[in-house]
């Protein structure tokens, strides 16, 4: 592991992780733009790290262009306001509290107070968001006939799929759906539930989705296609 940081032309700092590998002849370079931003590199054992860095610098223009077209990460801080599950939520930190509280204010906004130190702030906020999303997903599932219910539900941080349904009965959802409009998140849930009856994307499958979701499937799909990347802007 290395502690090298690549500074983008706009001043952004991206950690670089360099791995030495046996049996490889080349230096490889992979910018990671989902989850935590990172540049992942691998090099043969015999090649010194400085040479890998030189290689990275020689690709500076390309690396910059990759991160430039990815929405910037917002780091959430005490006092920030963010939106999840269709709620505007002000984030507060109470170092004296051990538990978290999410409270609906008189004006329709919400306040999320999390306990603990500054270093744990983002992590705790993320945990609350995940827990709230899971609650919402379960409520949505309970509104459907029992035959559609999955054996298990899991939240993941996938970049390419919003939901999936395994043959063992586990349904997985991207926790970043919490940042989508509620109706879009509900569509993804219904989509996966419909796969319990149809493992394909046949016309019969889509009829099942519409039956579960109601009117507006196309609109929800379009929203995801156009705005999906923006769901990765936090954390
Ligand atoms: Zn599907």
Image (cartoon, rainbow, N blue to C red):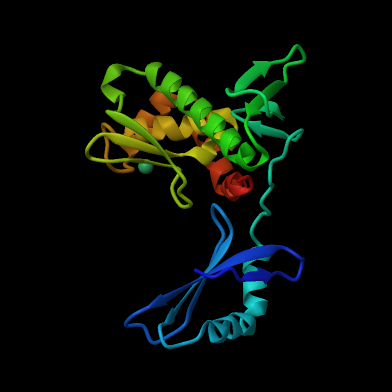
Relative to 69, say whether 230 is above or below: above
Numbered-mark total: 0
* Residue pictured at 63% horizontal, 45% vertical: 234
* Residue pictured at 64% horizontal, 81% vertical: 57
Relative to 144, say whether 75 is above or below: below
Q: Is residue 230 left or right of residue 130?
A: right
Q: Is residue 225 left or right of residue 113?
A: left
* Residue pictured at 48% horizontal, 51% vertical: 159
Between residue 54 and residue 32, name the one nearer to us: 54
* Residue pictured at 57% horizontal, 22% vertical: 99
- Outermost residue, left side: 168
Any part of residue 58 in sight:
yes
Dividing the image into four quarters, tell me where ligand 1 lies: top left
Q: Residue 78: percent from the left, percent from the top?
A: 73, 35
Between residue 3 and residue 15, name the one nearer to us: 3
Between residue 225 and residue 108, name the one nearer to us: 108
Q: Quadrant of residue 143?
A: top left
Any part of residue 214 in sight:
no
Q: Quadrant of residue 128?
A: top right
Relative to 63, say whether 36 is above or below: above
């Amino acid at each position: 592991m290395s502690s090298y940081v690549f500074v983008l032309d706009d001043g952004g700092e991206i950690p670089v992780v360099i791995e030495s590998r046996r049996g490889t002849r080349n230096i490889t370079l992979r910018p990671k733009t989902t989850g935590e931003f990172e540049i992942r590199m691998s090099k043969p054992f015999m090649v010194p790290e400085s040479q890998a860095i030189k290689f990275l610098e020689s690709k500076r223009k390309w690396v910059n262009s990759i991160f430039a077209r990815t929405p910037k990460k917002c780091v959430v801080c005490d006092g920030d306001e963010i939106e999840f599950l269709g709620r505007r939520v002000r984030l507060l930190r109470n170092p004296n509290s051990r538990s978290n509280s999410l409270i609906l204010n008189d004006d329709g906004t919400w306040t999320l107070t999390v306990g603990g130190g500054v270093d744990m702030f983002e992590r705790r906020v993320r945990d609350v968001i995940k827990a709230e999303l899971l609650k919402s997903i379960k409520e949505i599932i309970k509104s459907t006939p029992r035959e559609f219910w999955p054996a298990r539900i899991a939240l993941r941080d996938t970049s390419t799929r919003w939901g999936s349904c395994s043959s063992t009965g586990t349904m997985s959802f991207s926790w970043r759906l919490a940042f989508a409009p509620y109706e879009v998140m509900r569509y993804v849930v219904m989509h996966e539930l419909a796969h319990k009856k149809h493992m394909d994307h046949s016309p019969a499958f889509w009829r099942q989705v519409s039956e579960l979701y109601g009117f507006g499937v196309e609109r929800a799909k379009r929203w995801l296609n156009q705005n999906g990347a923006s769901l990765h802007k936090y954390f």
